[in-house]
Image (cartoon, helix red, strand yellow):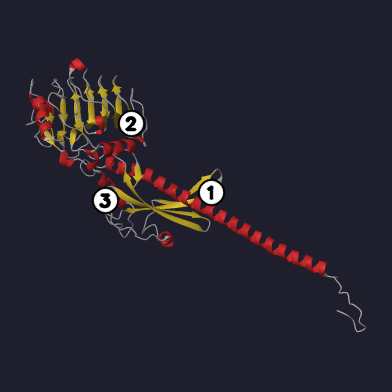
Amino acid sequence: MKDPLGNPVVQSQKGMALITALMLLSFLTIVGAALLSSTTVDMRIGMNYRTNAQLLFVAEAGIEAARESLRSAVETKINASAVDAIDTLPEGITEVLKDFDGTDTAFSSSVDVDTLLALTAAVEPRYADAVAVTSGATTIGTYTVFVRNDAADGVTSTTDTNEVVTLVSIAVIDNSEMLIEVDVRKGRFPDVPSALTLDGSVPNNAFGPGSSNGFAVAGNDAAGGPSVNGVGVIDAMSDTAVSNDITTNPDRSKAYCGSGTTFSEPCDTGGSTGPDVENISGDLDPVMTTVDGLNSIVEAIESNATSTTCPSSDVGSVSSPVVIVVTGDCSIGGNTTGWGLLVVNGALTMGGNTEWNGLVIVVDPAECDTTPAQGTHYAVTLAGGTQINGGLFIASTYNDSLNDVCINMNGGGILVMASGTEQNTPRWHCV
């Protein structure tokens, strides 16, 4: 470019540095704002994640507290009732549900947080109401729990038939809320239809029936509930073998009575047309008919065990029963008294004025052997002075199958009776 006189014109570069600096500053401002915005979003995401995690923990705390409360509440209903009024678990659960059905005698089916929290205590009593969860001196949040029936029985119904209920826990932290709904079932050993249950074939001469006049296996419930069979087996061959062992040298028929016999008098002194030995294979819960099923029950009970040591002294009480799971053989004697659930994953020997109040379960992995020359092995040996008020269940899982069962009860003064076992089992678990 030239001026009018033809001289070259030199363009001024003044101001370019300022423009460049402004452009860079603008760019850095945009980048900084983006980074600040991203950091803010990340912080909010982190806070939301933390709050969401805390809400879940608080809601789960409500479920855990309600599960433990259910355990004691149902047991209290059963234990405090008159004879035959409430003697089964579903009846006890039903009574607990009736305490929380409100004035409309039905439960709400809503899963909306605001709807549930707006219900008055008269209409929908709360199983737990705004219970604070704290960390040190800091309150993290609160949980409120509602109890209702499960879908199978009908959410609004107060009558339990399947031992499953639903817990609805609502967690509140500041203005945030979370609701979780969980079905829970009582973690317990399935009902057994006999005082002495032999969950496996019983070979000839593998049942030592006892020789003392003070000995009896009675299916009349010590807790006042309905009677059951004296001895339960799982096949016709075992029925014949056990019956023959009982009636031979001497005839101990009157010592084995239950729902299949008449026992207006005490079982061991007459009044029985026994022996009451019944094939109860059709009455067993399916989970009790496989090794995997039995092992799963033992594992579930073990997870709630009070102790894993074979008891050597008095354990538990009528008001505070224990859950003991022993891996390996267990021998109990020396005037020991126990209350609760005893599970032995091995061979069990009891004697010496031992009394157990509750259900005794023996799952023996060893092979039954009644041959003295080879060294006998019995899943259970009951010596003189043994008393079980609650029932005895025996299975052998040798070779990973339900195998032959051997029991030796040749000692004197043994008394095995059926009794209510609901209160002697672990707490509720999620299903």
Considering the image in quadrants, where does the N terminus appear?
bottom right
Residue, disc 1:
139
Mark whose residue sits in front, 2 or 3: 2
Crowd band around label 1 with a 10 angstrom C-alpha radius: few (<14), some (14–19), many (20+)? few
Cα separation, mark 1 vs mark 2, equals 38 Å
Q: How many marks?
A: 3
Residue, disc 2:
325
Crowd band around label 2 with a 10 angstrom C-alpha radius: few (<14), some (14–19), many (20+)? many
Residue, disc 3:
160
The structure residue drawn at horizontal position 46% and vertical position 51%, both measured from the top left corner, is: 56
Viewed as shown, does residue 153 lie left or right of 308? left
Q: Are marks 2 and 3 in contact (CB under 8 Å)?
A: no
Mark whose residue sits in front, 1 or 2: 2
Q: Amino acid at mark 3?
A: Asp
Cα separation, mark 2 vs mark 3, equals 29 Å
The structure residue drawn at horizontal position 24% and vertical position 29%, both measured from the top left corner, is: 398
Query: What is the x, y in percent for residue 93?
Result: 29, 47
State which tag comes first along the sequence, 2 or 3.
3
Which secondary structure, mark 3? loop
State which tag comes first along the sequence, 1 or 2.
1
